[in-house]
Image (cartoon, rainbow, N blue to C red):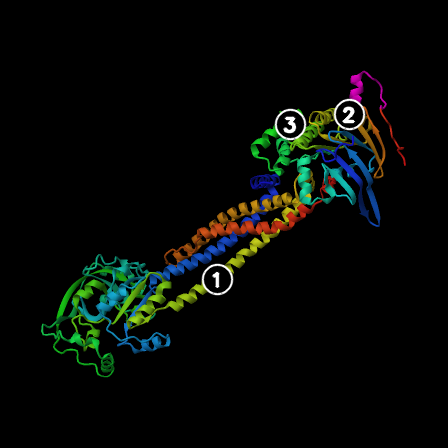
Amino acid sequence: MTENSTRAGTIRTEAVCRHYPMGDSVIRAVDGISLEVGAGEFVALLGSSGSGKSSLLNLIAGLDRPTSGAVIVNGDNLAEMSSEELSRYRRHSVGMVFQAFNLVGTMTLLENVELPMRFAETERGPRLERAREALQRVGLGGRLTHRPSQLSGGEQQRAALARALANRPSLLLADEPTGNLDSHTGNEILDLLHECNERLGMTLLLVTHERSLAERYAERLVFLADGKVVGEQANVPAFQRVAAGGSGKGTAGTQTQEGEQQ
Amino acid sequence: MKADDLVDLAARNLRESMFRNSLTTLGIGVGVASLVAMLSLGIGLQQLADRRLARSGLFDTIVVTSRRSLRGFDRADNRNGVPPAESRPLDEKARAEMARLPNVLEAVPDLRFISEVRYECKPHLAMVAGLPLSARDKDAFDNMQGRFFSSDAAEEAILQIQFADELLGIRQKLGESSSKASGQTQTLIGKELTLRYAERVPSPAAPESKPAEEGGGAGDRSGALKHAPQPPAMAAFSVVPRERKLRIVAVTDQDPEGMRGASGARVFIPLPMVEKLHVMLPSGLRGSEPDFSNVPAYLSLSVRVKSPDRVESVQDAIRKMGFSTFSTLDAARSLRRFFAVLDLFLGIFGSLALAVAALGIVNTLVMAILERRREIGIMKAIGASDGDVKKLFLAEAAVMGLVGGMLGVALGWAMGRLINAGANVYLHRQNLPSEELWAVPWWLVAGAIAFAIVISMISGLYPAARAARLDPVQALHYE
């Protein structure tokens, strides 16, 4: 797990804090989290709403800057990057999937998937080809010219995933990707995310509040509360247990849970 | 992001809120249209004035006189600091020299003489003047009844309308416009008149040795000229009365000679013909001695210059040759200044509408930012830099400017046409010929579109900067 931290897809946070001033008080959304994620790992960040898991994800995604501490991805400290460098990092190293899908409603699926490649200045020819390919991968090859509003939630999330993959990032960050979907569709999305992690070797960070979802594929569960890590446990993904003939739930391996309420 | 992607995205974003963006673009269009209409009117008026003045011969013509005959011009020359050159006769040699000067189109002698004109056996006394064929293009012939001389040597005449009335025995009431009588003067065209004049025939006994004196004693000569004009006769030539029949081809109600017409010629005949007639000219009596020759000196010459801005240099050159000159160059200069100020004011008024349109762009784009907050957040999350977002909004402003500019030019052109058509209806009612009051040169088209784009982009600066500053995390949470 503690591999060379400069490898593509490695994440290390060092006592990272993100505080928001709110009137006279300060909201400590992320309050000194140190975390290491190896390249190609599938880690689930678990916690109730307001636990700071999304804020942490935004810091790792380079959408936000830490108040203090360091976020080191692929060996570079995001806290020290200029906004131009950060945008380049987001463009090339990170793919994001959101709860609200966040497709551009005025664009077709193909155009949505093309968009990150436009920012990456990919030539039109390869851009279109890769966008089609990505949409095909998520099973939307026949709906290239549809607009997001013409699609079901599951389909929209697939398109969003295709967009996240467009620039072939080393990091895939999913923020409650199944939150707006029924459980069946949610599982399908999770399958796709897992496939990306397995086949493309992307590091996958999944933010969710549903433990069962996290246990399905994640190799490690990290529990957050009030902006702090309150527990961490290795997880044998449920699908592996099923494959191994095991039954029931429960978690194998070392459990280093420090108690959910601190 | 690449420029073509930028424009592509900007255009598709604009298409999304078609109605609002169309209204904004229309606003720019109206602004540009008013600017184009105002400026094209100003330019059109200026061109009209230039055309008129050029055809009137006022601003490209220099009148050259000899220093011997008109002392008044000498004083003007001295004031202008041109050294008084040696005084010399204004003869054919000098004319040819002037015609060879750079930028000179032609140097035409002013030949005129008082003569008896007989029409239907009644004698009339009139000033007869030679008219060069180049005078055909002057505006004095716009309203002429009949046609211009068919050739240099045609035995034809053009009458001034008052003289035509006189020939017909029509007495004009005081204050009555001469053009009112045009119905009757029409009947004169095609009729014949007889010109009776005195021809100067060189006497075989003319002393040819005289030109030898030319080299020396200029001072003596001019002194002699001032105080004691010698009798011209000296048995050097004889005067023979002649008659010539001329066909009336036209009647004009204006003075075709422009500024030269101070002496008011009544009958015009082709200039080369006047030269062939060897009429005994008044100048022949005054200014051709003591170096008397067979070639008579001219009273004055009109030198036509290629363009009004060459007048000054040509004028200087002619003064150095030793002649007095006169032109209305200064009047032309102040006229240009007037039009520059007029254009400026029209431009300012036209720009006001564009300024209002610029506010419309600011408003539209600020609204767009509010509406597209989430979209901006998404773009940033998937890798758009602040610069990309800024450029995208600027590109949207520029596209609106471009489309609005083109629309405005078209609209302004149509407005100009309309103004022109309206003005011409008015001119027709006043029995005046139609005019192009309005001109849209290509630089105005290109300039107006470029100006619209620049104004739009300046208007887009603030919204674009605001969009670029948007925090992606907040923008993504915005519903």
Instruction: Give coordinates of residue A227: x percent, y percent.
Output: 83, 39
Query: Which mark lies nearer to you, 3 or 1?
Result: 3
Residue B194 in view of the camera: no
In the rendered structure, the residue with mark 1 lies on which chain?
A: B
Is residue A242 part of the magenta span, yes or no? yes
| Nearest to the observer: residue A119 or residue B303 | A119
Q: CA distance from mark 3 to mark 2?
A: 23 Å
Q: Quadrant of residue A56?
A: top right
Q: Are marks 3 and 2 in contact (CB under 8 Å)?
A: no
Using the image, tell me which numbered label, if any, was put on residue B312. none
The residues colored magenta run: A237-252
For label 3, the crowd category at 10 Å Cα-Cα, with few meaning under 14, some 14 to 19 and many 20 or more, is many
Q: Is residue B128 magenta?
A: no
Asked if both marks, 3 and 2, belong to the same chain, the answer given is: yes
Up the image or down, B20 lies above or below A105; here it is below
Find disc 2 in the rendering and name its residue.
A217
Between circles 3 and 2, the one closer to the viewer is: 2
- Secondary structure, mark 3, is helix
Extreme-left residue of the structure: B204
Q: Position of residue B62 (x, y in %)?
A: 32, 67
The residue under label 3 is which amino acid type? Leu
Q: Are marks 3 and 1 on the same chain?
A: no
